[in-house]
Image (cartoon, rainbow, N blue to C red):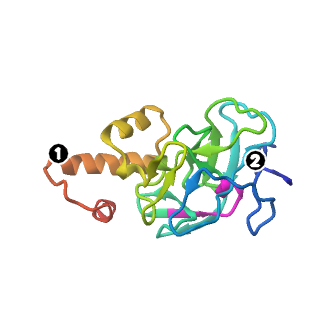
Amino acid sequence: MKWFPALRRGDWARAADAPRRHAALPDERYSLPGCSAPGLKVLAARDIRMGEVVFSDAGILRRWPDQHTIQIGKQSHFELHGDSCFASHSFAPSCYCRILRFAERPVDLVALRDLEEGEEITWNYCTTEWALVGDGFTDLDTRKAVRGFSHLSDGEKYELMATGTLSAHILSLWVRLLRFEAHNISDLSNEEILAH
C-alpha cells in the first residue's frame, strides 16, 4: 500500500492501485453489469475533520458522460484525473462532492463529518449525476439501484435535498422537471429534460 497526498491542504488518503500508481484494495460492495472485476476504494490515511477537503481534482471537460466522468453542469461532464476517481458511491456517504465549475480544480470531495484513519472515503453519486450511463449499478449494501438523481423516488429526492449536498445543476434540472410536470408534460425522457 502506498501513501499519497490527497492533492490539497496536506490531507492524505490511501487508495487502490488501478493501472496508475497505487495498490489494489478489492471492494465487493458493488456489482457492475458486464464487469467481473471488483471495484476499488479509498481509505482515510489519517483522521480528517468535518469540512476538510479530502480531494481536489483536475481533469478534462467532456460534453458526454461515460463511466469515468462526473457531471458538473447540465450538459458538462468532467473526466477525473486525480485520486478522487477511486472514491466509491454510498447512500450513507462520508463526503460530499463540491463543484467549483470554473476553478482550476473544479471537483472537491469534502468530509461530511469527522473521519477516522482507515475509514472509507465515499460520496453519493446521485448528488451530481442526473442519469448514470447505461443501467448504472447496484449498491450491494442496500441492494438499491444507483442510476442517478432522476431515477430516485420523490421521497428520496426531497431527503437528499435536505442534506444540502445536491449540486446546483441537479437542483436546476429537478426544478425544470417539476415545471414540466406542473404543466402535465411528464412523458419527457432524461435527454429531453437535459436539452431544454
Q: Secondary structure at mark 1?
A: helix
Q: Is residue 195 visible?
A: yes
Examine the structure image and report whether residue 58 is included in the region drawn in magenta.
no
Q: Say which residue label 2 marks.
A: 8
Instruction: Say which element carries label 2.
Output: loop
Which residue is drawn at the image coordinates 23% and 60% (left, top)? 188
State the image coordinates of residue 77 (x, y, percent, origin top left).
51, 63
Three-letter amino acid code at the position of disc 2: Arg
Could you tell me the amino acid type at mark 1?
Ala
Badge 1 crowding class, 10 Å Cα cut-off, few under 14, some 14 to 19, many 20 or more, is: few
Instruction: State the image quarter where residue 50 is shown.
Output: top right
Nearer to the camera, 126 or 54: 126
* Residue at x 36% of width, y 51% of height: 151
Q: Residue at x 85, y 54 (%)?
A: 1
Q: Position of residue 70 (x, y in %)?
A: 54, 58
Q: Which segment is the magenta one?
A: 77-86
Q: Residue furthest left?
A: 184
> Going from the N terminus, do you reach mark 2 or mark 1 first?
2
Judged left or right of residue 88, residue 21 is right
Q: In front of the other: label 2 or label 1?
A: 1
Residue at 64%, 65% (x, y): give it: 37
| Residue for badge 1 | 182
* The C terminus - image quarter: bottom left
User: Is residue 128 left or right of 151 when viewed as pictured?
Assistant: right
Label 2, label 1: how far apart the Cα atoms are: 44 Å
Tell me if mark 2 has few (under 14), some (14-19) or many (20+) residues whose alpha carbon lies within 10 angstroms of its own: some
Estimate the x, y position of residue 66 in percent, counting from the top left.
51, 68
Q: Nearer the viewer, residue 8 or 64?
A: 64
Q: Is residue 78 left or right of residue 5?
A: left
Which residue is nearer to you in this view: 124 or 100? 124
